[in-house]
Image: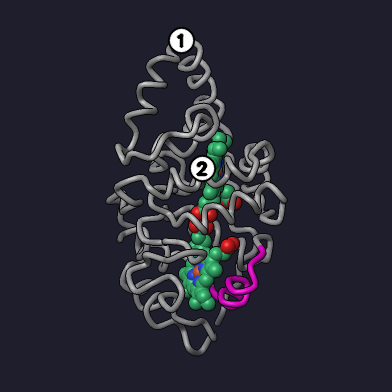
Amino acid sequence: MTTHVNNPRFSNKEHNGMTKQKRTVNKSAALLISGALLAVAGQASAAGGTGVPVPYRISSDCMVCHGMTGNNTIYPIVPKLAGQHKGYLELQLKQFKDRTRADQNGQIYMWPVAQSLDAAKIKELASYFASQKPAMQSSGVKHAGIKEGKVIFNQGITNEQIPACMECHGSDGQGAGAFPRLAGQRYGYMVQQLTYFHNGTRVNSLMNQIVKNITVAQMKDVAAYLSSL
Ligand code: HEC
Ligand code: HEC
C-alpha cells in the first residue's frame, strides 16, 4: 500500500515555529547590528578561515537564518550551505530570484532576499558558502529509519520505480556540480523538500519523477540516513 503525501502536518508546525523564531532572531540581529557593528565585522572576517573574502551581504542578509558559515543548526527548515556545491548554490539563488523555485518556504523566506542579488553577488555568495569548512555534517541527532533509509539511498525501491539516490547524489551523498550534497543536510529540511518535489511545488524534472511514488515514511527514512552522515 502506498500512502501519498498530502500537506503533512509537520510542514505547518515547522513553518509556524520558524515564523515565531524568526521574529525573535530578527530583533536580536537588529540589536547586534545597531549596537555592535564592529563585533559583527570582526566575526565576519574570521568566519571559516578559508581565505575566501566574506561578501558584505552575508552578515546583514544571510547570517540571521543560515549562520555566518552556512552551518546553521537552529531552524529545522533552513538548509545548511557550508560545503554545498558552487554550481548548485548559484542555480538555486538564480531560481529564487527569477521565481522558478516557487515552493512555499522558498517564496516566504528566499524570494525577498534573492530579489536584490545581481549575477556577480550570486557568484560571490555561492563561492563563499561552497568554500566553508567543515562541510555540512551530522548534528548528532539520530532519527528513526537510518537503516531503511540507507537501503533506499543505495538501491532505490524497485517495485515503486524509485531509482537509487546515489546514482546522482554520490555514494556517500557528497553530490557534485548541479547535484546537491545531501550528506549532513538537515532532516526537517530534506523531508520538506522531498514533500515539495512529490507534490510538484518545487519543480525539477528529475526529482519530480523520482519521488512520484515515495511515501512519507520512506522520505523520513532516507532523510534520517542522510542527516546522520
Ligand atoms: C529569513 C531567513 C533566511 C534568510 C535571511 C536567508 N535565507 Fe536562504 N533559505 C532560507 C530557507 C527557509 C530556505 C529553504 C527554502 C525552501 O524550502 O525552498 C533557504 C534556502 C536557501 C538556499 C537553497 C539551498 C538548497 O540546499 O537548496 C540557498 C542557496 C540560500 N538559501 C542562500 C541564502 C543566501 C546567500 C542568503 C543571504 C543573501 C540567504 N539565503 C538568506 C532562509 C533564509
Ligand atoms: C537522476 C538524478 C537524481 C537521482 C537518481 C536522485 N536525485 Fe535528488 N536531486 C537531483 C537534482 C538534479 C537535484 C537538484 C534539483 C534542483 O536544482 O532544484 C536534486 C535535489 C535533491 C534534494 C534537494 C536538496 C536541497 O539541498 O534542496 C533532495 C533532498 C534529494 N534530491 C533527494 C534525493 C533522494 C532521497 C533520492 C533517491 C530516492 C534522489 N534525490 C535521487 C538529481 C537526482
Q: Secondary structure at mark 2?
A: helix
Q: Magenta part of the protein: which range?
A: 203-214
Residue at 51 percent across and 89 percent down: it is 159
Give amino acid for label 1. Answer: Gly
Q: Is residue 76 visible?
A: yes
* Residue indicated by mark 2: 124
Q: Is residue 212 part of the magenta span, yes or no? A: yes
Quarter occupied by the C terminus? bottom left
- Front disc: 1 or 2: 2
Instruction: Look at the image and tell me in which quarter the N terminus lies.
Output: bottom right
Q: Which residue is mark 1?
A: 35
Q: Nearer the viewer, residue 54 or 142?
A: 54
Quarter of image, res 208: bottom right
Q: Is residue 227 above or below residue 221?
A: above
Q: Which mark is residue 14?
A: none
Taking the spot 54% from the left edge, 86% from the top edge, the residue there is: 161
Q: Is residue 195 visible?
A: no
Question: Does the stretch in magenta take in 191?
Answer: no
* Residue 45 position in % (x across, y down): 36, 28
